[in-house]
Amino acid sequence: MCTSLTYENSRGDHFLARTMDFAFELGGQPIFMPRQQEISGDAGTFTTKYGFIGAGRNLSHYIFVDGVNEFGLGAAALYFRGYAKYQQSAPADKLSIAPHDVVAWTLGNAQSVADLRELVKHIQILDVPVSLLGLTTPLHFIFSDPTGDTAVLEATNADLHLIDDPVGVMANSPELNWHLQNLSTYGTLQAAERPLQDRLGYQLPTQGPGTGALGLPGDYTSPSRFVRTVFNKHYSEAAADTPSTLTTLQHLLDGVTIPKGVKLMADGTSDYTQYRGYACLDDRSYYMEPYDNQELQGIRLTDEMLNDWDTPVEYPLDHTPHVKHLN
């Protein structure tokens, strides 16, 4: 399970943030991937053109679940159980891609969402398992760039195409269009206090500020997280610069972050937010915030990295909780 959102601050800078919610320990960390890499993907080898950074892990080859590339294109993969339908083979004129390799292929080959709209016509996502989990991961993907263009890729049949995401939010199943339709159920909610009407001549006492959001779902299901994120994103005050925007995004993700133990799987394991990722699309930087240390830890794509480095670089996360004492 996961939640993702895009954000534009008052300066016009764009961001893509997400929670990574999973019961199995994924062990991801920030990784830099240089230009011109040949990647032996699980459905076939593909080559990247562009450098990028993001959260990933080396499992015989580097697998990424989110990140941003040198053109500011951001991508994130989220679970799509029960709806993702992959093919068994690809036509001769299309590149075969495993679901868990889509993010790396995208960041390594597309310059923008508009560019990606054309490129996805030339790939096919195959039913290929990832070794870490021993199963084919049902995924859908959200993409955004510095123009604010945001779209989702949902492989529900062999015809791959991007779907516009007008609210810049994505969660898990069902499909994006279902979530957008479901928003109308909560279309009367507002940030301002809602005055109460009388009942049988009795004037009901107000419960104060917050009554405009009465009925906003508070559980951790995908539909509820989607609605809650759209509401909070819509009404939150716009931040002015990158540090304040990252802080705002932290607060927005607080609304859907899952503590350990409050959402249990059928086998008793805890589905929780293992980390939160933040891609700054305009300045090509990426930050991770692990569960046990809420200090942002990030890297920025520099010209030196892009022009001179030719080997992937892993950046271990600091999992030690940081507390600042004032005396």
Image: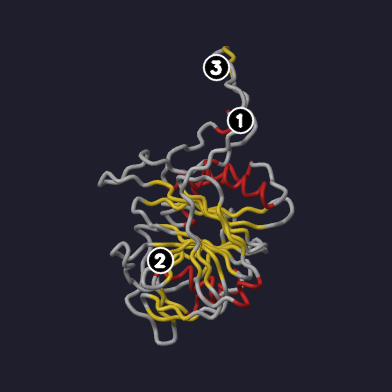
The secondary element bearing badge 1 is classed as loop
- Picture coordinates of residue 298 (x, y %)? 57, 57
The secondary element bearing badge 3 is classed as strand
The secondary element bearing badge 2 is classed as loop
Which residue does the image show at 62% across and 45% down from the upper left? 247
Q: Nearer the viewer, mark 2 or mark 3?
A: 2
Whether residue 178 is visible here, answered yes or no, is yes
Residue found at the far right of this picture? 11
Which residue does the image show at 41% across and 68% down from the upper left? 58
Cα–Cα gap, marks 2 and 3: 49 Å
Find residue 156 and name its label: 2
Picture mark count:
3
161 relative to 193 in the view: left or right: left
| Residue 190 drawn above or below residue 113 | above
- Mark 1 — residue? 327
| Residue 148 drawn above or below residue 91 | above
Disc 3 residue type (three-letter): Arg
- Picture coordinates of residue 272 (x, y %)? 40, 46
Mark 1 neighbour density, 10 Å: few (under 14) some (14–19) many (20 or more):
few
5 relative to 89 in the view: left or right: right
Whether residue 184 is visible here, answered yes or no, is no
Which residue does the image show at 58% across and 68% down from the upper left? 69
Disc 2 residue type (three-letter): Thr
- Picture coordinates of residue 146 (x, y %)? 66, 63
Find residue 199 and name its label: 3
- Picture coordinates of residue 288 (x, y %)? 52, 54
